[in-house]
Image (cartoon, rainbow, N blue to C red):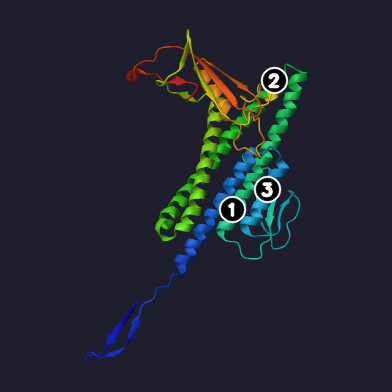
Amino acid sequence: MLSAVRNRAGELIGFTKITRDMTERKRAAEELAEHTRQQFAISELGLHALQTPELQVVMEAAIRVAQETLQVEDVRLLGPTEPPPPMARTVAIHAPKNSQSYGVLAAMPKRPFTANDLSFLEAVANVIAAAIARARIEEQLRLAERRTVEERGRSEQAEAALRERDEFISVAAHELRTPLTALQLKLQGLERGLAAADPRKFQRLEGAVRQTERLSRLIDRLLDVSRIAQGRLDLWLEEFVKLEVEQERVRLAVRDQGIGIPAEDVSRIFGRFQRAASIRNYGGLGLGLYITRYIVEAHRGTIAVASSVGEGSTFCIDLPRFGLAPAANRNRIRGARA
């Protein structure tokens, strides 16, 4: 902003200009944007780790995400006794519930690491540690299941391994929710700031917001599965729209025009983490039908499917008829939530 400067006689003798140093504000905005990008990357990596049973695939993805996000070419996984290269920035990879060392995640940057960079590297190491813990638990579970088949009397170990796996799913889902909630709040703040200032960047940011919403829904599915395993999913009864009535039962049929389900997969698609199509082509964790079956059975009903490949599927739900108490006197039924 320019202002004229005049002497006592009113004659123009020059101009003054006031400037503001925006360096610090720009630096803070860039740091926030980089932190948001890192949090989104770690959320995506965590979801990928939950969906991928192969430990080696998760490790390769973790190294790749660290390289791309931190712009560091050399990122390595080292064993517990393997010395890191000189000048490497390292974080420990250890078991989630104790101090057992799985190794070290080492990065060789060509620039100084910020606090956000180091925090991100630690988050990547935590995802790797959780994947290693899960792989070890699943290996223990497979061994226990084989022993159970061979020796029917040794079922307690397998049940304990199953509980540990369910606990892992619950803990992982809760741990993912915390950074995801923070990410959503920061993205919403950026949205408000860019809505009028930069419409093009606002549109790109909307895509990131939609992805965080998708991640939130997937985490909710995982938490529902954990509650089902622990018998803590609550069912709230409500009146329903129109159904087909057959004597003492009612039937709800839903038909889609999708890819259909092969005959050999029909018997297993209502199981937990079961899918009839490759995850590379279709998203999801294979939990929707499992949760649906649980809720239907909590109503003392049954669910079945008739399907042909390429011709879609028809899902039929049969429920017993029973009276519903008035709204003021409705009781909550433990076991499921509709």
In the picture of the structure, the residue carrying the numbered disc 2 is: 155
Relative placement, left or right, of 282 versus 103 is left
Q: Position of residue 333 (x, y in %)?
A: 45, 19
Q: Position of residue 91 (x, y in %)?
A: 65, 53
Give above or below for 153 relative to 100.
above
Q: Position of residue 3 (x, y in %)?
A: 31, 81
Q: In the rendered image, which quarter contains the N terminus?
A: bottom left
Q: Mark 3: which secondary structure?
A: helix
Mark 1 or 2, nearer chain start: 1
Q: Mark 2: which secondary structure?
A: loop
Q: Which residue is drawn at the image coordinates 71% and 48% (left, top)?
A: 60
Task: Give the label, 3 or 1, closer to the camera.
Answer: 3
Residue contact between numbered discs 2 and 3, judged by CB atoms under 8 Å:
no
Q: Amino acid at mark 2?
A: Ser
Q: Amino acid at mark 1?
A: Phe
Find residue 20 and name its label: none
Find residue 120 and name its label: 1
Residue found at the far left of this picture: 9
Q: Amino acid at mark 3?
A: Ala
In the picture of the structure, the residue carrying the numbered disc 3 is: 61
